[in-house]
Image (cartoon, rainbow, N blue to C red):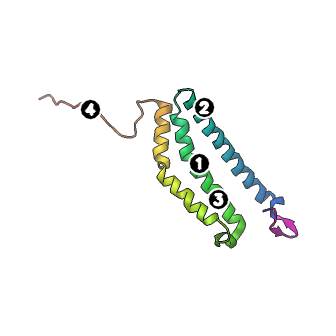
Amino acid sequence: MKTRQSFGQPLATYQGVSFPIVTHYQQLEMLKWQAYRGLWLRDQGRSHTKEAATVKWLGPKYSQEAIHECLLLNGHYAYTKEMPLEQRLRDVIGLEIGDGTAQANQMVIAKQLIGKAYRSYQHSNQTEHVKG
């Protein structure tokens, strides 16, 4: 965005271009710190389940959004083999599937926040007896 020009100025000088870049940068930085926090908790022998699930859920989500923005900012040129964006998008979508779906990671986070009583499914080892 620093080298592409529009009306004689680099695209990066326009708020409509720079603000989304800032947003994606900040989301990915926050996520990086969440990953560091999870690793620190693990090193301390403490629970880090929700932090790990958050990174596994939001890492691919935020990355996909940032790559999509890059595709839009670069126009049709972004879909050529000269730019790696279309391959990056496929790679990150694979992570959204392979490292646990968003819903699976949200279930893990909900269980950690709400407690073991939270279950999106019923699982019981007890059998019900019907009085007759």
Residue at the farthest right position: 8
Percent x, y of residue 19: 76, 53
Q: Earlier in the sequence, mark 1 or mark 4?
A: 1
Classed neighbour count for the residue bearing mark 1: other residues with Cα under 10 Å, few (<14), some (14–19), many (≥20): some
If the image is split into quadrants, where does the C terminus sit? top left
Residue at the farthest front position: 43
For image coordinates 88% across by 69% down, the residue present is 8
Secondary structure category for the residue under label 2:
helix
Q: Distance of mark 1 from mark 4, alpha carbons? A: 36 Å
Q: Earlier in the sequence, mark 2 or mark 1?
A: 2
Q: Which residues are magenta?
A: 2-10
Q: Distance of mark 3 from mark 4, alpha carbons? A: 46 Å
Q: Is residue 100 left or right of residue 62?
A: left
Q: Label 4, on which residue?
A: 125
Q: Amino acid at mark 4?
A: Asn
Classed neighbour count for the residue bearing mark 4: other residues with Cα under 10 Å, few (<14), some (14–19), many (≥20): few
> Is residue 7 found inside the magenta-colored segment of the image?
yes
Secondary structure category for the residue under label 3:
helix
Q: Label 3, on which residue?
A: 67
Percent x, y of residue 57: 54, 46
Classed neighbour count for the residue bearing mark 3: other residues with Cα under 10 Å, few (<14), some (14–19), many (≥20): some
Q: Distance of mark 2 from mark 4, alpha carbons? A: 36 Å
Q: Amino acid at mark 1?
A: Gly
Q: Label 1, on which residue?
A: 59
* Depth order, front residue of 48/122: 48
Residue 117 in which image quadrant: top left
